Image (cartoon, rainbow, N blue to C red):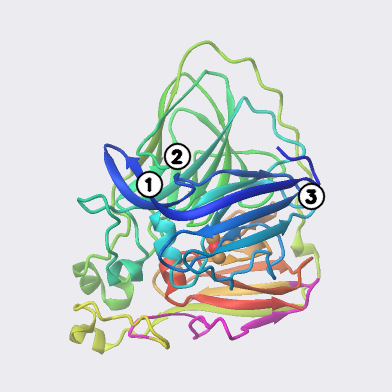
Amino acid sequence: LPSAGGLLEQDLEAAPARVRIGSRTANVQAFNGSLPGPTLRVRPGDTLRVRMRNGLAAPTNLHVHGLHVSPEGNGDNPFVSIAPGESFDYEHRIPEDHPPGTYWYHPHHHGHVADQIAAGLYGVIVVEDPDPVPVTRERVLVVSDLSLDPDGNLSDVTPMEQMMGREGRIVLVNGQVRPQLSAAPGERELWRVVNACPARFLHLSLDGQGLRLLSRDVGRLREPVDVTEVELAPGNRVELLVETRQGTSTLVTSPVDRGSMAGMMGGGMGRMMGDDRPGGDEPVELLTLGVAGDRAPEPEAVAAAAPLRDLREEPVAQRRTLDFAMGGMGAGMMDGGMLDGGMMDDGDGPGMMSFTINGQEFDPGRLDETVRAGTVEEWILTNSSPMDHPFHLHVWPMQVVEDGNRDLAEPVWLDVVNIPARGRVVVRVAFDDFPGRTVYHCHILDHEDLGMMGTVEAR
Ligand code: C2O
Ligand code: CU
Ligand code: CU
């Protein structure tokens, strides 16, 4: 572990890999040959240098999801393109006051993001807490999903799956099907859980164990909160304290209703086309935890963290509205365009089905929003479509200030905020520290690849 002000250097190669999944051999893509890639651990004040090599047949790049680092040059630049066979040297200066937490890395080359993450390209970045919570054990748990054909190759994705957001039929934790963990009773474990699925929402519960929520996405809650279940949109992370009790428990994800096309097409038509419930209706078992043996010594009490910044107490320089829409589904679709698989074009301009923010599909050459560096803005995020869209902003975390589905008594900070179907959420953002241009987008990665992304520059 580097000391604060230290340097962590890491080589990452994105390349095809053969791995064991359950009882079969699968041809996936991975960083350094493993699912997930290596966990990178840094402290606030450190510099992280990554030499990224592209061993794939398609262009790629590397994004450090959730880190508050510069979006320019060789930093977290979403516009970098690394050609097959090429390398790129990234350097990220992590500020001294960077919030601790569980972050992650993944490719971010527009048009390839869903394919590359679904293929297995993801890994975790831990920003260590200078004042860590005393625990007996720490686990990093990356949840992902994929679909394999009978030969163990990644299944082709249908246009309907892209439109809904693909959900893999196999759900993995750290590249394994239902791993078995063990612990002694009386332990306090820290679980860093990452939702690396391209589109699947997770609704987690762990029967028979004491669960406390320590962190969501960014930083740490003032006090851990007792929970029985917790929901993660794609891209979200949680840190959970598991206070172990004797017995065997299963971590389960229950189905989440994230809307469907049915509302747009008329329920009957939507259901006929098989889109009514992405992810299926059944809970999925993610892992088992067996707790047995002698009782572990009592861990020390958890001290309260410093209160989180509350932008509700700060002046707002600018308000803007971003509307998320899915359009272009006219009668033409029913005339066969959709059913023969031709409902979306992958070229320029809206196809029959378009995914837009404020009416526009992503154009890397267009600047959509210009913000004053150092000011606080309020963004009103509205969803006029019948499906949820988890909104993600790079570089600057968001404080949720209005959301009918959340208790906002304590400040809630996230880097992915779900905007429910036909709903709205209001966030505030402090555009501090880094001038430069980056992106925001829906973290249902098929939607992002289909155009639900915009550009923002702080000047
Ligand atoms: Cu995790 Cu722009 O993405
Ligand atoms: Cu990101
Ligand atoms: Cu979306």
Disc 1 element: loop
- Quadrant (top left, top right, bottom left, bottom right) of the C terminus: bottom right
**Of the residues under marks 3 and 1, which one precedes in the sequence?**
3
Instruction: Report which residue position mark 1 lands on.
Output: 254
List the single residue furthest toward the front: 85
Q: Is mark 1 within 8 Å of ligand 3?
A: no
Rounded to the nearest angstrom, the CA distance separating label 3 from label 1 is: 39 Å
Residue shown at 52% from the left, 18% from the top = 184
Rounded to the nearest angstrom, the CA distance separating label 2 from label 3 is: 35 Å
Residue shown at 29% from the left, 87% from the top = 330
Is 437 or 224 nearer to us in this picture? 437
Instruction: Report which residue position mark 2 lands on.
Output: 205
Where 12 falls versus 444 (above or below)?
Answer: above
Instruction: Report which residue position mark 3 lands on.
Output: 45
Question: What's drawn in magenta, residue-wise?
Answer: 351-376
Disc 2 element: strand
Dots 2 and 1: beta carbons under 8 Å? yes
Could you say where residue 95 lies in the image, as x and y percent from the top left? Answer: 78, 55
